[in-house]
Image (cartoon, helix red, strand yellow):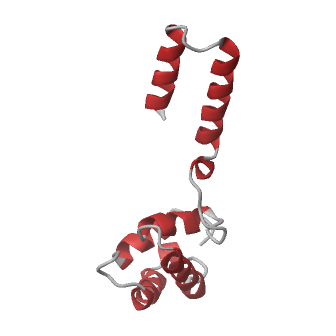
Amino acid sequence: MSALLDALVQRRREQSLEYHEYLKQIAKLAKLVADPASSRSYPPAINTSGRRAMYELVAEDENSALTLDDAIRRSAQDGWRVSRFKLRRIELAIAEVIDPEIVSPTDVLEVAKHHSEY
């Protein structure tokens, strides 16, 4: 993002942009910063931040991302982030639905920990 902003400011300094156009591009850049999901196009089912994270983790495979999301939601119990037994239950559920060669269940679990929807 900062590279985009630097390039935009440099072009403005060189007077290659009209002020009105410059403001439009600044507004567009601000929207990208405020909502990073809008900078990429995701399939319609990939509609939450957790699903987007899973989608990116499994190399943009929609079915795998949704399968992981479902496995985490089905196996997660209240307070799972602080209980090693509950964490292990989720990790086993993840391992059942995804090949560890594609992505490590531990990596999926770490990503899930950082999304409040799980």
**Residue situated furthest bottom in the rendering:** 96
- Give the position of the C terminus as an image quadrant: bottom right
On the image, the x and y values in percent for residue 26 come to 63, 26
Is 2 on the left or on the right of 39, as rendered?
A: left
Q: Is residue 69 above or below residue 96?
A: above
Q: Nearer the viewer, residue 15 or 26?
A: 15
Describe residue 79's horizontal placement relative to residue 100 as left or right.
right
- Name the spot of residue 62 as percent of width and height, x first: 53, 74
The picture places residue 65, in percent across and down from the top left corner, at 51, 75
Residue 86 shows in this picture: yes
Residue projecting furthest to the left = 101
Residue 108 percent coordinates (x, y) = 42, 72
> Which quadrant holds residue 107?
bottom left
Q: How many marks?
A: 0
Residue at (47, 67) in percent of width and height: 60
Residue 117 drawn above or below residue 18? below
The residue depicted at 42 percent of the width and 71 percent of the height is 58
Viewer-nearest residue: 61 or 79: 61
- Vertical side of 117 occupied by 67: above or below: below
Looking at the image, residue 108 lies above or below residue 70: above
Q: Residue at x 41, y 84 (%)?
A: 98
Q: Residue furthest front?
A: 16
Task: Please say whether residue 113 is visible from this viewpoint.
Answer: no
